Every structure is written in C-alpha cells, then in structure tokens.
C-alpha cells in the first residue's frame, strides 16, 4: 500500500508537469510506462486480494460521492467516444487483447477501477501510435491526439483520487496495512 501511494504521488506530480510544460517525449513515454506498471501491480498484487474480502461490498468513504460523479461526469463514456473516433481515423490500428482476470466478477465494485485501468491502457496504445506517426497532434488544440491526451489525464486524475480517498482508505480501515 505504501509503495502504491508513493507511486500515486509521483504520477500526480508528473500530471502537473505535463499540464504546465511543453510535452517532452522521453519523459512522457516514461510516464505512460510508469502508470501502466502501477496498474499492473494493483491488478496482480492488491485487487485479487481485495476481491476476496467480504467487506468490499460495504463500500468505502465517499463511495456515494464518487458514484454521483460517475453519473454526472462519466469520464469512461467520454473515453469510449474518443476511442471510437480514433478507430475511425486509423482503421488499420488494432488494440492489444485485454488481459483476462479470473478473480474479477462483473458485479464486483472492483469492476469500476478495472474498467478505468483498461481504458487507460487503450488510451496509452492510441497515444503511442500518434506519438509515432503524427507527434505534432499532441500539442495542437482540437486535434485527436490532444483530445486523447486530455482524456487520459482526466481519467487518471479521477481514478487516483478514487483509489486514494475511497479504496485505499477502506483497505487501511479493515486491515491496518
Ligand atoms: Fe488503479
Ligand atoms: Fe493506483
């Protein structure tokens, strides 16, 4: 938990830099890979264990608040729309197959953070593709690349806050980890 929380702090710092400075490709690639690795750690080391806990369905602090946010500002739906636009613009592009997790039940509260991980992973694939073939898009307003970057950052920010203020708090309350 401590390690994951420290990683959140690093990711939040990088997001602030990303939003306040010209895009540095090397640093951006490092950032994308760091986020992906962080998500993989949660999926393989933390979430499978949480999925077995009976207290998971009780919900964490601010759970209702975050469900309301999801209904009012559906970041995931905005990402789905952007991904569809990307697929139409680059019809030859193929996404990697999403990883299948035996511990994940569709009714589990963890399906929300897992959906966010998967969308963020798809956005990463799009961003890498555009960085490779049309990098100036990443800075042009109204371009698909810039839109996908904004979606990526927005989704990540809300995801980090939800884990920090809800899921991780719940884990600490229940286990004193
Ligand atoms: Fe996460
Ligand atoms: Fe996280």
Image: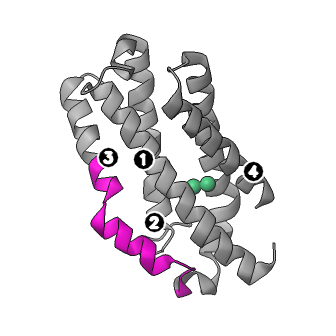
In this rendering, the label closer to the viewer, 2 or 1? 1
Q: Is residue 139 magenta?
A: no
**x%, y% of residue 156?**
49, 48
Horizontally, residue 9 falls left or right of residue 81, namely right
Quarter holding the C terminus?
bottom right
Q: Earlier in the sequence, mark 4 or mark 3?
A: 4
Mark 3–mark 1 distance (CA, rounded to whole Å): 9 Å
Quarter holding the N terminus?
bottom right
Give the residue at x 55% y 18%.
Answer: 24
Location of residue 166 (image quadrant): bottom right
The residue carrying mark 3 is: 79
In this rendering, the label closer to the viewer, 2 or 3? 3
Q: What element carries label 2?
A: helix
Horizontally, residue 95 falls left or right of residue 47, namely left
Q: Which of marks 1 and 4 is nearer the N terminus?
A: 4
Q: Earlier in the sequence, mark 2 or mark 1?
A: 2
Give the residue at x 38% y 22%.
Answer: 138
Q: Give the range drawn in magenta.
A: 58-78
Location of residue 44 (image quadrant): bottom right
Could you tell me if residue 24 is visible in this image?
yes
The residue carrying mark 4 is: 6
| Dot 4 beta carbon under 8 Å from ligand 2 | no
Q: CB of mark 3 within 8 Å of CB of mark 1?
A: no
Give the residue at x 60% y 17%.
Answer: 26
Residue reaching furthest to the left: 88
The residue carrying mark 2 is: 111
Give the residue at x 54% y 17%.
Answer: 25
């Amino acid at each position: 938990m401590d390690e994951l929380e420290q990683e959140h702090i690093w990711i939040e710092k990088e997001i602030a830099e990303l939003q306040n400075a010209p895009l540095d490709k090397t640093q951006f690639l490092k950032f994308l890979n760091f986020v992906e690795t962080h998500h993989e750690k949660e999926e393989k080391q933390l979430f499978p264990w949480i999925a077995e806990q009976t207290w998971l369905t009780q919900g964490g602090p601010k759970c209702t608040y975050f469900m309301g946010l999801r209904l009012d500002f559906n970041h995931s739906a905005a990402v789905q729309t952007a991904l569809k636009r990307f697929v139409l613009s680059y019809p030859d592009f193929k996404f990697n197959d999403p990883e299948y997790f035996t511990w994940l039940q569709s009714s589990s509260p963890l399906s929300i953070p897992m959906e966010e991980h998967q969308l963020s992973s798809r956005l990463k694939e799009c961003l890498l593709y555009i960085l490779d073939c049309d990098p100036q898009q990443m800075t042009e307003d109204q371009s698909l690349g810039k839109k996908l970057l904004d979606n990526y950052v927005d989704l990540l920010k809300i995801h980090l806050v939800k884990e920090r203020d809800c899921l991780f708090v719940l884990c600490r309350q229940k286990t004193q980890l």
